[in-house]
Amino acid sequence: MRPPAPKPPAAASSSSYSQREPRPENPLLLLPSSRASKFSLGCPLLDRLLSGGLPAASVTEIAGESATGKTQLCLQLALLAPQSPLSASALFLHSDLPFPLHRLRRLAPKSRPDILDHVLVAAAHTPADLLSLLSRAQRLLAHPARSPHRLPIRLILLDSIASLFRADFDASPADLRRRSALFFQISAKLKELAYRHQCVVVVTNQVVDVVEGDAGNTVAWSSGRRVSPALGIAWANCVNTRLFLTREVDGGSGIARRRMKVAFAPHLPVRSCEFVIRRDGVFGVDPAER
C-alpha cells in the first residue's frame, strides 16, 4: 500500500508574508560616513545641519572667503576635542602665519586650564612639509601610549590647503599635473589616517572668483561675488564632504550675515543654516529667533 502523498504547505497569508518580507532601507545608511561616530561642532543647530556633527573616518572640507569663520571653527573644534565623547587631542596644522594663539586662549574655557595641553600645533609651508608632518602624525596615532600625559589624537585640522599651493606652481600642463598628483597624495594620506584610526579630518580651503562658467566645481554667492573653492575640480574629488561658508553684509546696518551650506556629502542633503561668530565661538541662528 502506497503511503499518502504529503500535503502541500498551506499558502502563507498576506499578513504573515508582509511580516517576513524585508523592509527596504535607505542606501545612504550603508555608507561608512553614516555609521561612523560624529564630532559635535558645539552648537545644536549646526549639529542638526550635519545630522549629528562631523563624521569620523572621512575628510571634511570647509571652504569660504576670508572672514567667513573657517579658522574660528577650527579653533572651536580643537578645544572641543578633549571635552567631547571622543576624549581626544587635536592636531592643528596651519599654513597661514601667524597661528592665532591669542584667539585660541580667549576661546579656551577658564574651568579647564589644562585644555591647551591637548592641542598640538605645527606649521606646514609647502606640500612636502605637510606630507612629512602627516607621516610623523601617523607614528603618534599608531603609538598613543608613548605620550601618557596627553589624550590620543582623534582630530586633525589643516588650515588651509590652498595656502600650500600659492607658489612654485604655474598654469603649464606639467605643473598642473604635478599639482594634481600632490592633491591625490595628500588626500590619500589624510583618508588613510582618518579610516585607520577613526579620526575626524577637517581641511579649510579658500575661494577664487568665478568669471564665467564653473567647470563643474561648486559655485556660490559671497560678498556680492560668484566664488568657487580654490584648487579646482581636481581637489574637489579629494574630499568626502564640502561645507561652504558665505558672507553677505547688510547695506543698511553693516552687519555681516553668514551661512553654512552643505555643498555635497555622501550622507547629507544640500541644505544651509545661518550662523554668527561671537566672543565665545561660532553658533547657529534659529530663523524663528533671528
Image (cartoon, rainbow, N blue to C red):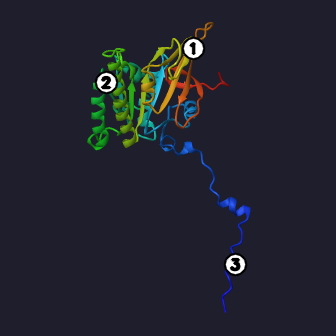
Give the camera-side residue of 258 and 237: 237
Asked if marks 2 and 3 touch (Cβ < 8 Å), the reply is no
Percent across and percent down for residue 54 are 49, 35
Residue 193, by quadrant, is: top left
Residue 127's label in the rendered image is: 2
Q: Percent position (x, y) of residue 24? A: 62, 50
Upstream in sequence: badge 1 or badge 2: 2
Q: Amino acid at mark 1?
A: Glu
Residue drawn 28% across and 34% down? 135
**Disc 3 and disc 1: Cα gap in Å?**
76 Å
- Residue 270 at what x, y percent from top left? 58, 30
Placement of the C terminus among the 4 image quadrants:
top right
Q: Earlier in the sequence, mark 3 or mark 1?
A: 3
Residue 75 is at least partly visible in this image? no
Q: Please identify the quadrant where the N terminus is shown.
A: bottom right
Mark 1 to mark 2: distance in Å? Answer: 32 Å
Q: Residues within 10 Å of mark 2 (few under 14, many from 20)?
A: some
Callout 1 secondary element: strand
Give the number of the disc on residue 166. Answer: none
Residue behind mark 1: 248
Q: Residue furthest bottom?
A: 1
**Which image quadrant for residue 108?**
top left
Q: Residues within 10 Å of mark 3 (few under 14, many from 20)?
A: few
Residue beneath label 3, please? 7
Residue occupying the point 31% across, 24% down: 127
Asked if residue 138 lies left or right of residue 81, the reply is left
Query: Mark 1 or mark 2: which is in front?
Result: 2
Q: Amino acid at mark 2?
A: Pro
Quarter location, residue 180: top left
